[in-house]
Image: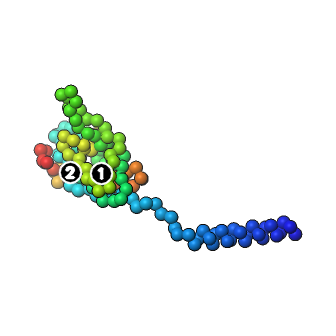
Amino acid sequence: MHRRSFTAALACALLLTGAWLSALPAWSAPPAAEVQVENAWIPQPPPGTDVAAAYFTLHNAGHTEAVLVGVSSPVAANAMVHESMVMQGQSMMMPVERLTIRPGETVTLKPNGMHVMLNSVRKPLQVGERVALVLRFANGEELHVSAQVRPLGSQ
């Protein structure tokens, strides 16, 4: 008899706990960063090369920082953010592992600065063509971008 009372009391407690938990407001994660991409473009690579650079402007219209941690494109074997700089009179590119865009901040990837480097481009890119880019953020979100190929020398 004692075991039955204990089992009944436990069942009652579990039911009451479930009712209490369901009355609490649902928890939700903070709103994700709202990153907008503008003016995505790629200068047409010179004939015979298998690399290209992509440029665009990122604006974080959200309330949390956005951290760009990766880029990919179906036209290239690999892609990553690089920054061009001159050190001791020598031009070089350094990989940018994490690009943080604070709330309200705008970051522009442009020639002679930060850019997406597309390596082992699988086919020649033609002026007017649209190239898909996938931007991956630290929070797991992806942003799909379409970059237009412009004539070499465009800005």
Residue at coordinates 17% horizontally, 46% vertically from top-left?
A: 43
Q: Residue at x 68, y 71 (%)?
A: 15
The image position of residue 55, as x and y in percent, is: 22, 48
The circle drawn on residue 133 is 1
Disc marking residue 41: 2
Which secondary structure, mark 2? strand
Q: Residues within 10 Å of mark 1 (few under 14, many from 20)?
A: many
Image quarter for residue 111? top left
Q: Tag 2 or tag 1, which sits nearer the N-term?
A: 2
Closer to the camera, 51 or 48? 51
Type of amino acid at the residue the image marks with label 2: Trp
- Name the kind of residue labelled 1 in the image: Leu
Query: How far across and down, in percent of the image, does residue 132 sit?
Result: 28, 53
149 or 101, nearer to the observer: 101
Q: At 31% across and 38% down in the image, what residue appears?
A: 95
Residue 46 appears left or right of 18: left
